Amino acid sequence: MRDRRYPIVDRERRLVLSFAFFDHAGAARDLPLTNRPRVPSPFRAPLTFQIAELFQIDRGKIDQVEAVLNTTPYGMRSDIRDPR
């Protein structure tokens, strides 16, 4: 995960909107699971997901999540500029 942003935090409605990029190198051929044998990886080539997620918080814990993923070229840069 990289370039994480939390542009909206609504304390009254207990909602948090986040954006991030998730890079998959596509190098892993299979994945270990805790409850069964390894399974084939669905990612056979490098790709990046651009992710938007809306979290609902209840009593300090995540209660619900709505997410939208968009596939982008691997390593795509964010338009975020470091203000430092």
Image (cartoon, rainbow, N blue to C red):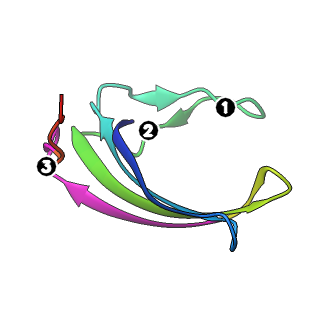
Q: Which mark is residue 33?
A: 1
**Residue highlighted by disc 2:** 41
First in sequence, mark 2 or 1: give its number: 1
Q: CA distance from mark 3 to mark 2?
A: 19 Å
Quadrant where the C terminus is found in the figure: top left
Specify the segment rendered in magenta. 65-77
Identify the element where label 2 is drawn. loop
Left or right, 43 with reference to 16: left
Residue 46, image x, y percentages: 21, 38
Residue 6, image x, y percentages: 44, 52
Of residue 45 and residue 54, the one placed in the foreground of this image is 54
Q: Are marks 3 and 1 in contact (CB under 8 Å)?
A: no
Amino acid type, callout 3: Pro
Q: Are marks 3 and 2 in contact (CB under 8 Å)?
A: no
Amino acid type, callout 1: Leu
Mark 1, other Cα within 10 Å: few <14 / some 14–19 / many ≥20: few
Mark whose residue sits in front, 3 or 2: 3
Of residue 16 and residue 53, the one placed in the foreground of this image is 16
Identify the element where label 1 is drawn. loop
Identify the element where label 3 is drawn. loop
Residue sitting at x 38%, y 48%: 5
Q: Does residue 17 sit above or below 26 in this rendering?
A: below
Amino acid type, callout 2: Ser
First in sequence, mark 3 or 2: give its number: 2
Mark whose residue sits in front, 3 or 1: 3
Q: Which mark is residue 73?
A: 3
Left or right, 36 with reference to 16: right
Mark 2, other Cα within 10 Å: few <14 / some 14–19 / many ≥20: few
Residue 35, image x, y percentages: 78, 34
